[in-house]
Image: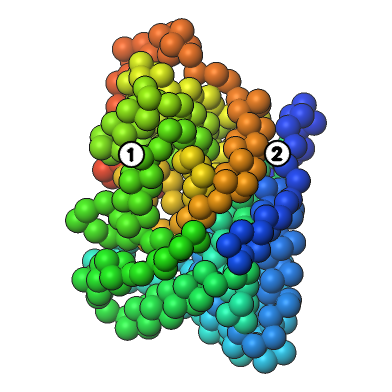
Amino acid sequence: MAEPDGTLTPLDESVDFHDAESFEVASAGHRFQFYPGGSDRLAALIELIDSAQASLKMCFYMFQPDHAGTKVRGALIRAAQRGVDLHLIVDAFGSDAPESFFAPIVRAGGKFSLFSPRWDVRYLIRNHQKFAIADDARAITGGFNVSDHYFATPQQNGWIDLGVSIEGPVVTKFVEWFAELSGWVAKGSSQFLAIRRLIRDWNGGEGPVQLLLGGPSRITSAWARTVKRDISRGNRLDLAMAYFSPPRSMRRLIRKLARCGSARLVMAGKSDNTTTIGASRALYGGLLRAGVRIAEFEPCKLHLKLLVVDDVTYFGSANLDMRSIRLNLELMVRVEDAELADRMREMIDHLEAWSEPVTREWYRNKATLLSRIRWRLSWFLVSVVDYTVARRLNLGL
């Protein structure tokens, strides 16, 4: 856990778990470089910024004024100083850094914008996406934010996460989406209906590699609808997810798949917000009865957003919870490729090997009346209210 002043926990050498090595997969005219390790993610982000010659487009939910944030800011300042057309968008709700922290980027010639800077309707929306694009040709995305905790080691209880560098045709979709997003931010007024239209009308592309989005919607977001379609047709589901509290319709599909095929869920056993763990546990009973295999990752905090359904892999910023499905601006990359799906299952295997199995006996021992009440309250806070309120209460365990 973080210390009260925000610093990382000192090294705990008793934690034997180590991040998986980076690896590369070529698929459908794309080159994907995967970074399961925190230090590798930070190095890849810095390298992307330092390699930019013409343009840099970046959007992050959280950008903290700590060691990693200062290092990334330094790379952005260097890019602006060498004439790169730079635009950084940061979510005002997710980041603690004051605007003055980003002022040196602007002085160097870059552009900085806050998403949802005002107390109006659009303040309800969280821009939970994380991505950067260099020269409109290479992108990096995943679940990680710009903060020490997302680049720290497991021994420091850093977040287990994933960064993915992408080269190929789908990068043009990232460029198109950033143009839409920056235009909306620039308008300054609420424009709530406008962002809903952007999400509703978004075309994620055809073929085996797609960029899917989610946002404020009366119905399930596009990325989640596609996930539901794949699960409804699938025979095998493997999932590693930080926050898991999906709507009833998706839970029903997972149970149905488990009865006809196999479903494996690796959940967080540690978090800075234990209420999210309680929200997941509130759903374990029905899943276990349907034959879903569940495990909770124990060595350190889990922040991964990874789903594999048959030969299809999803990665990006979205959790499988109500806020990510119905309200947050989210980004998920969908790749249909059997080799990649097998490789990502190996990554989930690695996590499961370090996880505590959630058996029916485990559940009976844990699910006391008091625990079930707390878990249900946790589910309500996470699904209906807000993560921040839930984090302050931290009542899920």
Q: Quadrant of the N terminus?
A: top right
Q: Amino acid at mark 1?
A: Ser
Which residue reaches farthest right?
13
Provide residue 394's location: percent of width, then percent of height.
43, 34
Asked which secondary structure carries label 2, the reply is helix
Provide residue 258's location: percent of width, then percent of height.
40, 25
Q: Residue at x 56, y 56 (%)?
A: 142
Using the image, determine if residue 51 lies above or below residue 217.
below
Q: Is residue 169 left or right of residue 226?
A: right
| Mark 2 neighbour class, 10 Å CA radius: few under 14, some 14 to 19, many 20 or more | many
* Residue 154: mark: 2
Q: Residue at x 71, y 68 (%)?
A: 46
* Residue 232: mark: 1
Observer able to see residue 207: yes
Observer able to see residue 97: no
Q: Are marks 2 and 1 in contact (CB under 8 Å)?
A: no
Q: Residue at x 55, y 77 (%)?
A: 57
Q: Quadrant of the C terminus?
A: top left
Q: Residue at x 43, y 33 (%)?
A: 235
Asked which secondary structure carries label 1, the reply is helix
Q: Earlier in the sequence, mark 2 or mark 1?
A: 2
Q: Is residue 29 left or right of residue 290?
A: right
Provide residue 18's location: percent of width, then percent of height.
75, 37
